[in-house]
C-alpha cells in the first residue's frame, strides 16, 4: 500500500475533474457529495493491471475541502504479487504518485 496526502489551490470539483481526465486507468466508481456552504467531498476509485506484479491495483482518490483548503488523499492497494509476500516492485507507489504528478502545478502544501 502506498499513500500520498497534499493540499491544492483549487476546488475539490476542479481537482476531481482533472484527476479523472488524466489518470491512465479504468474508473470503476465515482461519487461527489455537496455538504453545503461550498464544502464538497469526492471519491474516485480506479483499477489498473500492472504486468510487473501480475495483478490489478486499486487507486482510491479522496478530495475534500471540509477544513478549508482542498485536501487530496491518494491510496493505492492490492499490488502485492502473492498472498505471503507484500512486495510489489513499486507498482503501488507509481500508481498513487500519479495523482500527485497530475496535480503538481497546484500543490500548495505536501
Image (spheres, rainbow, N blue to C red):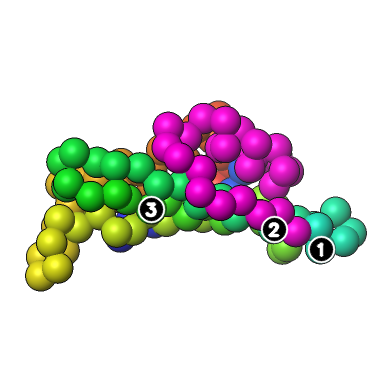
Towards the viewer: 48 or 9: 48
| Residue depicted at 47% across the width and 35% down the height | 23
Q: Is residue 86 above or below residue 7?
A: below
For the record, the magenta segment spans 9-33
Under circle 2, the secondary element is strand
* Residue to which mark 1 is pinned: 35
Under circle 3, the secondary element is strand
Quarter placement of the N terminus: bottom left
Mark-to-mark CA distance, 3 and 2:
19 Å
Crowd class of label 3 (few under 14; some 14 to 19; many from 20; radius 10 Å): many
The image shows residue 10 at horizontal and vertical percentages of: 70, 39
The image shows residue 75 at horizontal and vertical percentages of: 42, 56
The image shows residue 9 at horizontal and vertical percentages of: 67, 40
Q: Are marks 3 and 2 in contact (CB under 8 Å)?
A: no
Mark-to-mark CA distance, 3 and 1:
26 Å
Residue 34, visible in the rendered structure: yes
**Based on the displayed image, in which of its 4 quarters is residue 2 positioned?**
bottom left
Mark 3 or 1, nearer chain start = 1
Residue 106, visible in the rendered structure: no
Mark-to-mark CA distance, 1 and 2:
7 Å
Q: Give the left or right position of residue 86, taking residue 28 as reference.
A: left
Towards the viewer: 26 or 33: 26
* Residue to which mark 2 is pinned: 41
Does the segment drawn in magenta span residue 28?
Answer: yes
Residue 58 - label: 3
Q: Give the left or right position of residue 109, taking residue 96 as reference.
A: right
Amino acid at each position: 500500500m502506498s499513500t500520498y496526502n497534499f493540499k491544492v489551490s483549487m476546488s475539490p470539483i476542479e481537482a476531481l475533474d482533472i484527476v479523472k481526465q488524466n489518470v491512465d486507468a479504468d474508473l470503476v466508481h465515482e461519487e461527489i457529495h455537496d455538504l453545503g456552504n461550498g464544502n464538497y467531498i469526492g471519491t474516485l476509485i480506479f483499477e489498473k493491471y500492472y504486468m510487473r506484479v501480475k495483478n490489478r491495483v486499486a487507486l482510491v482518490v479522496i478530495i475534500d475541502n471540509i477544513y478549508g483548503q482542498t485536501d487530496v488523499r491518494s491510496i493505492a492497494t492490492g499490488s502485492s504479487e502473492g498472498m505471503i509476500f507484500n512486495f510489489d516492485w513499486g507498482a503501488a507507489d507509481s500508481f498513487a504518485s500519479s495523482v500527485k504528478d497530475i496535480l503538481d502545478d497546484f500543490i500548495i502544501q505536501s
